[in-house]
Amino acid sequence: MNRSILLNPGPVTLSDRVRQALLRGDWCHREPEFAELTLDIRRRLVEVYPEASPDYEAILLTGSGTCAVEAMLSSLIPPQGKALVVCNGVYGERMAAMITAHGKAIATVVSAWLDPIDLVAIEQILTHDPAITHVVAVHHETTTGRLNNIAALGQLCQRWGVALLLDTVSSFGAEAIDFGGWNLEACAATANKCLHGVPGLAFVLVKRTSMETHDSAAGSLYLNLHRYYQEQIQGFSPFTQAVQVAFALQEALKELQDKGGWQARHLHYQTLAHQIRRGLHHLGFNLLLTERELSASLTSFKLLPRISYVQLHDQLKQAGFTIYAGQGGLKNDIFRIANMGDIFDEDVERLLTCFHRIGKNASHTSSI
Ligand SMILES: *Cc1c(COP(=O)(O)O)cnc(C)c1O
């Protein structure tokens, strides 16, 4: 029996090691053993990028990636602050919607989903609008698979002295994040994408000085990072945490470390992504973006006219593979294949064999 393989960008295919960790037991989140577990996870999270560990604190939240993103934006942009939100996909647009919902001042630089972020327009706004306190952007824009040029954006943030808040939900643990060079105040991510944990816990890595010196700006009680920080210094949390999900996250972080850390994971993803891109190229599928624009963890392919997304999805699903549709305006044009999770080259070989069979059947049917 083959394993079923998730090729959507989270939740991911689990390793047995992580799945087994879910069964460790029934614990109360207010007992010292859970506090110890929380402290261990928080330490491991800041050590995924060792250069982050002296200056950043990890704050754990029960919720999905969006929960951590919203906690970051609601807690760190002060009521009198102003955010410049950079959008070239669903997740940038979602952050702009959050800031608007919180009633905070906002400017946006919106690019088409297929375009890179507009650094010229960003610099112009930073030059002309001294009210901007924060730049808000997505590292890996999962809508298309583009790894945004945060190195250049971070340089602008350094130069203009504005803090950067980053959605690293689909990059944390597998792509380079320059904690020293981007004027990065915080980044938000989740247990269940590149870290290979179970959905249900998310986290924000935030500069310790922001937690110690700024009073909470939070327009939310439940998502107030300052409140979590005050208690998580001791390992406790204001509200019930997802205990079993925390077991799995700790195991996933140990596994990441045992396998060589984020750089090794990046290389592994890169190898799988190349194998997928090469294989599907041979079968006639074209990339939505150029290879050098893409992250290591996800690829968007253009659909072929002779086979719809639903047909492709359903046939692959029967064979044990779950692929992912395009969003919004790309819904009928593309499909996405993520290679996060406990996936290996033999899984990709099997996937490519299925694609080959589906392609042959489709061309056979359409020629009748
Ligand atoms: C998946 C994803 C999110 C949202 O995560 P949820 O866990 O679905 O809330 C946010 N941003 C990016 C870039 C993502 O890929």
Image (spheres, rainbow, N blue to C red):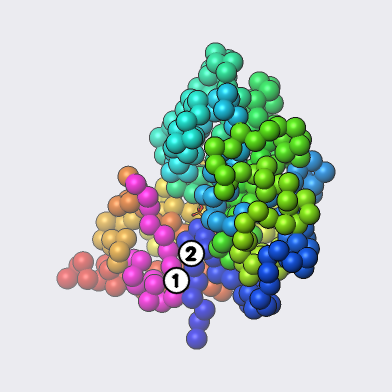
Above or below: residue 238 compared with residue 125: below
- Within 10 Å of disc 2 (Cα), the crowding (few <14, some 14-19, many 20+) is many
Q: Are marks 2 and 1 in contact (CB under 8 Å)?
A: yes
Disc 1 residue crowd, few under 14, some 14–19, many 20+, Cα 10 Å: many
Q: Nearer the viewer, residue 14 or 35?
A: 35
Q: Position of residue 117 (x, y in %)?
A: 51, 33
Q: Please, what is the three-letter code of the amino acid marked with disc 2?
A: Leu
* Residue located at (55% from left, 63% from top): 199
Q: Please provide the residue range marked out in magenta.
A: 312-328
Q: Which residue is mark 1?
A: 321
Q: Residue at x 34, y 55 (%)?
A: 303
In the displayed structure image, the side of residue 178 where residue 299 appears, left or right = left
Q: Position of residue 229 (x, y in %)?
A: 71, 47
Mark 2 sits on what residue? 7
Foreground of the two, 309 or 30: 30
SS class, disc 2: loop
Q: Secondary structure at mark 1?
A: strand
For the C terminus, the image quarter is bottom left
Mark 2 or mark 1: name the one nearer the start of the chain: 2
Q: Amino acid at mark 1?
A: Phe
Q: Is residue 78 magenta?
A: no
Residue 66 at what x, y percent from top left?
A: 52, 49
Relative placement, left or right, of 351 versus 168 is: left
Judge whether 120 appears above or below 245 on screen: above
What is the x, y in percent for residue 109?
47, 28
